[in-house]
Amino acid sequence: MFSLKVDDEIELGLFEVKQAPTLFALVDQNREYLREWLPWLDANTSVEDTKTFIKGALQQFAENNGFQAGIWYKGELAGTIGFHYVHWVTGRTEIGYWLGKNHEGHGIMTRATRKLVEYAFNDLGLNRVEIRCATGNHKSRAIPERLGFTREGTLRQVFRNYDQLFDIVVYGMLAGEWGK
Ligand SMILES: CC(C)(COP(=O)(O)OP(=O)(O)OC[C@H]1O[C@@H](n2cnc3c(N)ncnc32)[C@H](O)[C@@H]1OP(=O)(O)O)[C@@H](O)C(=O)NCCC(=O)NCCS
């Protein structure tokens, strides 16, 4: 299975269906915490739902249209990261991520995101990586800001989280800017 070593502590691995119970347990333990900024919690209430998610993600990978990986921190599942899609015509992708609450504050997501940006530019030959965050999601926004992304603009009321609409900040990094 596809995997990427980030450093001595972190490994990213494409999800396999047999990992559904482990992933579901992490989702379930963090349900209320994740609900603040992720819209899919009410559609994932069983191991079966998580299996469906993983099968969809494997299909996405097979179609060369992105992937969803587990973030394994010191051998334990800490969260997920992936490319929502790959638009090959324009050479761009968008990264999405979440962590279990116990794993916040160690730089895990910043390190994992840095690795995926390098992978996008150096291995896939893409030209643009985007990260979209709700304006009020300061911990998420800190990741592209720490990595030197450009804040490109705000889209008003485009993200629905349960019963509320939120503004989104779009961050972008171009291949020619990365590492400068
Ligand atoms: C968004 C989310 C992944 C951010 O998690 P995070 O732990 O703040 O991010 P990181 O793993 O990069 O860690 C950064 C923190 O670790 C610290 N840190 C420690 N070592 C570090 C290192 N080597 N590199 C970078 N930061 C490091 C940073 O100072 C920062 O701490 P601070 O917030 O007190 O300043 C997490 O809050 C989350 O999953 N939220 C719920 C779901 C969500 O919002 N998803 C995103 C939707 S757009």
Image (tube, helix red, strand yellow):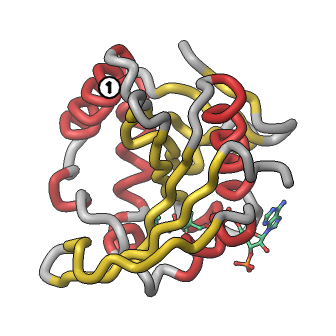
Q: Is residue 71 toward the left or the right of residue 94 in the image?
A: right
Query: Which residue: 20% across, 82% down?
Result: 165
Circle 1 residue: 60
Q: Quadrant of residue 42?
A: bottom left
Q: Nearer the viewer, residue 168 or 24?
A: 168
Q: In which quarter of the image is residue 110?
A: bottom right
Secondary-structure class at tag 1: helix
- Above or below, 18 relative to 31: above
Query: Which residue: 25% across, 28% down?
Result: 56
- Above or below, 56 relative to 82: above
Q: Give neighbour class at mark 1: few <14, some 14-19, many 20+ (Cα, 10 Å).
A: some
Q: Quadrant of residue 108?
A: bottom right
What is the x, y in percent for residue 154? Answer: 40, 79
- Mark 1 CB within 8 Å of ligand 1: no
**Mark count:** 1
Q: Is residue 39 toward the left or the right of residue 61 in the image?
A: left
Could you tell me the amino acid type at mark 1? Gln
- Above or below, 166 relative to 79: below
What is the x, y in percent for residue 86? Answer: 41, 34
Query: Which residue: 21% across, 44% down?
Result: 46
Query: Which residue: 67% across, 32% down?
Result: 119
Quarter of the figure that contains the C terminus: bottom right
What is the x, y in percent for residue 81? Answer: 52, 45
